[in-house]
Amino acid sequence: MNKPTIRTPAIFSQFPEITAGVTMHSAPLSPGNQFNETNYGTGLLANHYAGDELATQTNAVQAARHALATDLIGPGAVATFVGQVHGATVVEATPGGDANSTVEADGIFTGSANHLLGVVLADCGGVLFYDPDTKLIAAVHSGWRGTKDRIVPTAIAALTARGVVASRLQVYLSPTPCASHYEVGPEFNDYFESKFIFKDGERHYFNNAAAIQAQLEEAGISHIEIDPTCSIEDTHFHSHRRDQPTAGRFVAFIGRRA
């Protein structure tokens, strides 16, 4: 099994106990050749290997995620990923029952060490949190629906309820579509403030990264790293907008070593 290429956020570099990042392809994807890399950096980790029977091989998916956790954290590490439903549910992962599993939610957090949390993406925003005081970590999947339903503030509330001081949180936002490529319908004017909607004639475009950043800042968070990469432009990343219906998924993950 080949290992994925990983982009590591700079914001967590001051915390040697943290492993975090996004998986990406070492070479750009090309039409008709997106899914030849049968490794845990592409389809296996994401539970979505478009055009291939691997999409239904749940055991293989869980094994790939466990392998990633073991490689990044060490023997005995477990992995819990969320099976996104484009909602605003945030749950706590605990060792044991959640080990090497998938839970139905769009946000997950834990205070446990040696536990890797992950979300899978193809244009949605992956938001990773770490609190150096309580040692809690979290991973959130925030597409436009999640941003509309304020899943990021929901996750922050779950963390602060467990003693986290929001201003101490360290946060990374994964590659997302740049607004110039993310065309939406006029109904988005009802969902978001006008500063997040850009118009070009009759066309409307949405800046999800800016909307997520605003929600973080509203909560008092200033330690934020926004990945400037456009997931639609950069073919090292999967993109539903660009590649549908054959789009795969990439992964945003975070874990803490004991």
Image (cartoon, grey):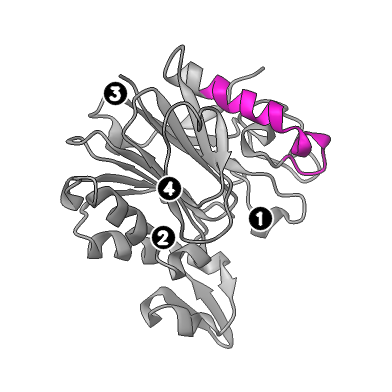
Residue type at mark 1? Answer: His
**Circle 1 residue:** 240
Q: Is residue 63 magenta?
A: yes
Front: mark 3 or 4:
4
**Circle 3 residue:** 17
The percent coordinates of residue 199 (x first, y second) are 50, 82
Q: Residue at x 17, y 36 (%)?
A: 133
Sort mark 2 into few (<14), some (14-19) or many (20+) by Cα contacts within 10 Å. many
Main secondary structure of the magenta stretch: helix
**Circle 2 residue:** 151
Q: Are marks 3 and 1 in contact (CB under 8 Å)?
A: no
Please report the bounds of the magenta region as a residue range: 49-68
Q: Residue at x 29, y 34 (%)?
A: 12
Q: Earlier in the sequence, mark 3 or mark 4?
A: 3
Q: Earlier in the sequence, mark 1 or mark 2?
A: 2
Front: mark 3 or 2:
2
Sort mark 1 into few (<14), some (14-19) or many (20+) by Cα contacts within 10 Å. some
The percent coordinates of residue 4 (x first, y second) are 57, 26
Query: Left or right: where does residue 211 sit relative to residue 239?
Result: left
Q: Residue at x 34, y 25 (%)?
A: 113
The numbered dot on residue 91 is: 4
Relative depth, front residue between 140 and 28: 140
Q: Secondary structure at mark 3?
A: loop
Q: Distance between the Cα atoms at labels 3 and 4?
A: 23 Å
Front: mark 4 or 1:
4
Q: Distance between the Cα atoms at labels 4 and 1?
A: 26 Å
Q: Distance between the Cα atoms at labels 4 and 2?
A: 11 Å
The percent coordinates of residue 47 (x first, y second) are 67, 39
Query: Left or right: where does residue 161 sit relative to residue 202?
Result: left
Q: Distance between the Cα atoms at labels 1 and 2?
A: 21 Å
